[in-house]
Amino acid sequence: MKRLSYTVLAFGLTFATSTSAIAQAAADPAPPPRTGQQFPTSGMEAPVTNEGTIDDGAVEALNEMSNYLMSAKTLALTSEATRDVVTNDGQRIQLEGVAKYKIRRPGFVIDYDSDIKSRRFIYDGKNFTVYSPKLGFYATVPAPGTNREVLDTIYQKFGIALPLEDLFRWGDGSSAARVQAFKSAYNVGTATIDGVPTDHYAFREADIDWEIWIQQGDQPLPKKLVIVDRTDPSRPTFTARLNWQVNPAFTDADFTFVPDANAKRIQLATFKGDK
């Protein structure tokens, strides 16, 4: 009998609750119907409000990060990135890509691979080579004797800007004009990226917004990077998670380009700039 009594009581409570819900539903308008995937809402109590703030500490964090990267004898990096491509009707499509870096002074190798494109950039201290494994073409040109000079030369002469090269430039003074032109620069807070405590910084320039997460402690390695293009109404975004090895062992063979037997050598087109 006790089980029956509990059952009747439970039914009574359920019925009363249901009756109240029906009455409330009759009084309140129905919620709008679901339309496809719902975008998640923010868990923050209030939005970050630092419009126009230039925090010297945020700028100094960039310098310290860059100087630390430049102080390493060798570095290895794997960047797992997502890039938005905007269609003609304004829809954003995401493309995935992985870039692997080997860096020494002088010398670097960057292997970029995605379903759309594969490229290899090799600087051995004397020559710079661009190789397209899928197309079977490569081009080699004489290069200056330092990594920084190579980055400047290939951009000015051939219009080639290598992925993530800005990470190494903040501490050498070459980005002073960009720093002076910051619209905002501030510390958002702390965050854990892939199990690593980081400091999260946000920056605004004339045409882009970007964020960087820098590892705390005596190895200020950038762990994540987000760049938003504000010149496009769709706000296409580039996001990369960065995993580093500091001072790995390399040999000269790691920076030597040996073309495939069927690869064809071509010439790099000279960048003529805007007319």
Image (cartoon, helix red, strand yellow):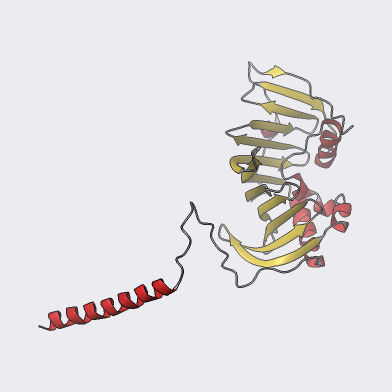
Residue at coordinates 72% horizontally, 66% vertically from top-left?
Answer: 187
Q: From what the image shows, is residue 83 above or below residue 171?
A: above
Percent coordinates x, y for residue 52 in the rendering: 81, 65
Q: Position of residue 90 (x, y in %)?
A: 65, 43
Q: Position of residue 238 (x, y in %)?
A: 66, 47
Q: Nearer the viewer, residue 199 or 149?
A: 199
Residue lying farthest to the left in this orientation: 1
Q: Nearer the viewer, residue 9 or 30?
A: 30
In this view, 68 is above or below 137 = below
Q: Is residue 11 left or right of residue 86?
A: left
Residue closer to the observer: 69 or 162: 162
**In the rendered view of the protein, which quadrant contains the N terminus?**
bottom left
Quarter placement of the C terminus = top right
Residue 244: tell me if it is visible.
no
Identified at 13% across, 83% down, the residue is 2
> Residue at 77% of width from left, 42% of height from top?
105
How many numbered callouts? Answer: 0
Residue 134, visible in the rendered structure: yes
Q: Residue at x 77, y 25 (%)?
A: 140
Q: Position of residue 224 (x, y in %)?
A: 65, 54
Residue 234 lies, with reference to residue 44, above or below; the image says above
Question: Is 38 left, or right, of 198 in this rendering?
Answer: left
In the rendered image, the residue lying farthest to the front is 26
